[in-house]
Image (spheres, coloured by chain):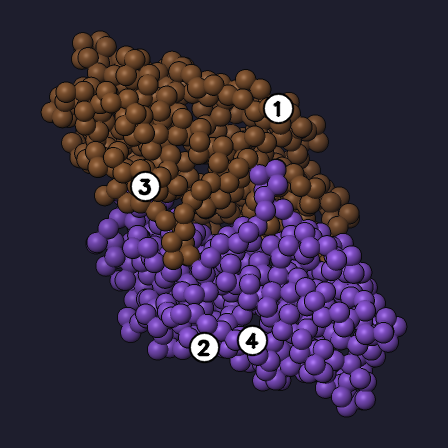
Chain colours: A brown, B purple
Amino acid sequence: MNNLLVAQSGGPTAAINATLAGVLQGVRASGKVDKVFGAKNGIEGAINDQLIDLNDIVRDIEALDTLTYTPSSALGTCRFKMKDWREDEATYKKIIDTFYKHDIKYFIYIGGNDSMDTVDKLSEYCKVNNHDFIVMGAPKTIDNDLNLTDHSPGFGSAAKYIATTLAEIACDIGAYNIPAVTIVEIMGRNAGWLTASAALSRLNGGSGADLIYLCEKEFDKDKFISDVKEKLAEKPGILVAISEGIKDKNGNYVSDLVSSGEVDNFGHKYIAGSARALESLVRDEIGCKVRAIELNLMQRAAAHIASETDIIESLMLGQKALTCALNGETGRMAAIKRLSNKPYRVEFVSVPVNEVANHEKVVPLEWITPDGHDVTQEMIDYLYPLIQGETNLKFENGIPKQIKLY
Amino acid sequence: MNNLLVAQSGGPTAAINATLAGVLQGVRASGKVDKVFGAKNGIEGAINDQLIDLNDIVRDIEALDTLTYTPSSALGTCRFKMKDWREDEATYKKIIDTFYKHDIKYFIYIGGNDSMDTVDKLSEYCKVNNHDFIVMGAPKTIDNDLNLTDHSPGFGSAAKYIATTLAEIACDIGAYNIPAVTIVEIMGRNAGWLTASAALSRLNGGSGADLIYLCEKEFDKDKFISDVKEKLAEKPGILVAISEGIKDKNGNYVSDLVSSGEVDNFGHKYIAGSARALESLVRDEIGCKVRAIELNLMQRAAAHIASETDIIESLMLGQKALTCALNGETGRMAAIKRLSNKPYRVEFVSVPVNEVANHEKVVPLEWITPDGHDVTQEMIDYLYPLIQGETNLKFENGIPKQIKLY
């Protein structure tokens, strides 16, 4: 039997189920896989032998379509960091036992950095110990910080959500004629790709983000206050986009500066984000109306405004990972290679997963403008194709149709 | 000359420009209006003679279409509360001067409670002082708290955004297998209609909001903690929806309990919302992972997920307000009368604006379940039709097309 196991890991995205659907489409098209299982909650499902039968869904075109547009990880997710097999072989043996028990030959793991580390370690363990299993990775992360792939599935949809939402918020705040600052906090502790996509809110010539601060560049609060004052002199409503991970010159997160010890009236400690820290700062230093907004889980879950380009590429990467697995590739990750921006052309390749795992691809400093509060045209040219197109998501009863696999 | 002035006021919504477009469509269709102006920033534009020429847009079908789907108030907005004319006649005289100067016969004011108060006072002033001007209101408010109309334009789109977003967030948190509580704060200080729409996230049988607390009902934090614990015993990821305006038994806002005096490391004072207050509470009383989410401006600006029903009704109410004005009605507001739920049928009527102004329509307590943490089927039947259908919003460069009127 040539059975296949697929799993998802790390933070959910609006496109990770599209990659799962891509793997299942590939299974259907290839005719080379006997049975397909999903591991529940990532590698933990393989360790604990908690598998979900996916054979019915492979045969159901409509279900595959609904899966493609359902946000989050339909198989469940985990944040499990594998130790080296020499330190903890028991965990590896449990996985291998699950593989043997269910005649699994191929394992495809869809995820980010930590998941690629698992692919790396598990494939190495299999090679060294002569277990004839294929372990392939497929990328996903809204953070876009994966190495060796031009960009990562899930990122384009999150970027489209951010660009759209900031264009809409700009309309809202633009309707008022009193000075006001709105600060939007965008996910990304170390990589500012998503925050950079705030620049796309201005694509149609309308207003959008006025100031953009990425976490790659040292954040200077005096400079920030003077930037905001300068913009306020031009118009009343100012929209600021910041990475959650902006840091001061000592490398301390701005958010840490306000979450260290305050206690509220219930006697409870606070944890605040960067936007809220800057909200207080603006209120006291400038004194105008100010509002902090966190795009929170919405930016990674908003399948209703997913990018068609992202969803198609996510599907293709699932298919590519499967094709590579069927061709005997192991310890590798399906990836995107960009051939050109205009017209936008990519090809799907595979790359060695050990060069992906535990690396973090951050924004090159030269893609941030010299004034430190915007991004360059090169960055916009890179981002632009990734948010193009709207999907064929179906609505039922006024809300998006979704699938549940367990 | 029979000229018309139109203005928008109060908090922006995703549908208030549809009502403006409806007025302009009506102008085009009627052939009874010579010139159309928009007052900039609501009644302030009439007071200060800041008018925008809208005659070109009346003739441009494509621009009217783009206006329909552009969120926020394209004419700008204000929060200006008129005093009684006997106290401050100067302001009234300025408005009347603007009307005479531009040969304005009809004034249509699109807005919520405060705007309808302006319509009421201004129309009364004109009658008493024998100024032959027509003053009509058209409703809008995402809060849905306007009297004498079954529901208000903007509400259905905000409700659709909330239902969709909560269904997506439920997918996200459902992927994890560790206990976690996510608390979503929804706009509404005194009326919980929007929070009630969180129940629509479950319409397709998937998971959605598990607990829903409206501001109409006294909020008991011990009961809340016990409700959450009960749900956590059933499944790991719990989604809670609360009104920003939930209050304790003494009528104090829950949000006030945590925003009274804390100072952060910058020395700045905090202002927190209800969700953040409950986040701290859950962290300390239950100890599991917890996250506060505010839907913030997105819930009123998200035109990209507007309800088709809402947009069409908003257009119709603009047309209705114009028709009433042309028929000589003054001091009244265009409104929606619901004829039946299934099939959903409404008619557009006009109602006396003095019975709308300064009233607040809250959720009837019998539409909240006896356990206090959900809404009844009657509430769902009321809400259901309002979020149906998706709009024909156009995208350009991957983000929604929008119009700017000034």
- Residue B241: horizontal and vertical position, in percent? 39, 59
Question: Considering depth in this image, is B332 or B235 the residue closer to the camera?
Answer: B332
Instruction: Find the distance from the CA under tag 1 to the CA under tag 3.
Output: 34 Å
The chain letter under disc 3 is: A
Instruction: Name the image quarter holding the C terminus of chain B.
Output: bottom right
Q: Residue at x 54, y 42 (%)?
A: A162
- Residue B220: horizontal and vertical position, in percent? 34, 69
- Residue A152: horizontal and vertical position, in percent? 45, 27
Instruction: Find the distance from the CA under tag 3 to the CA under tag 4.
Output: 40 Å
Instruction: Find the distance from the CA under tag 3 to the CA under tag 2.
Output: 37 Å
Local crowd size for mark 1, using a 10 Å CA cut-off: few (<14), some (14–19), many (≥20): few
Local crowd size for mark 3, using a 10 Å CA cut-off: few (<14), some (14–19), many (≥20): few
Return the residue at label 1: A342
The chain letter under disc 4 is: B
Q: Residue at x 88, y 72 (%)?
A: B101
Instruction: Name the image quarter holding the N terminus of chain B.
Output: bottom right
Local crowd size for mark 4, using a 10 Å CA cut-off: few (<14), some (14–19), many (≥20): some
When the figure is inspected, residue A219 is found, relative to residue B161, above or below; the finding is above
Return the residue at label 2: B339
Q: Which of the 4 quarters of the picture holds residue A222?
A: top right
- The kind of secondary structure element at disc 2 is strand
The label nearer to you, 1 versus 3, is 3
Q: Residue at x 60, y 65 (%)?
A: B315
Question: Considering depth in this image, is B194 or A319 the residue closer to the camera?
Answer: A319
**What's the amino acid at mark 3?**
Glu
Return the residue at label 4: B348
Return the residue at label 3: A62
Residue furthest bottom in the image: B128
Instruction: Find the distance from the CA under tag 1 to the CA under tag 2.
Output: 54 Å
**Comes first in the chain, label 4 or label 2:** 2
**Comes first in the chain, label 1 or label 3:** 3
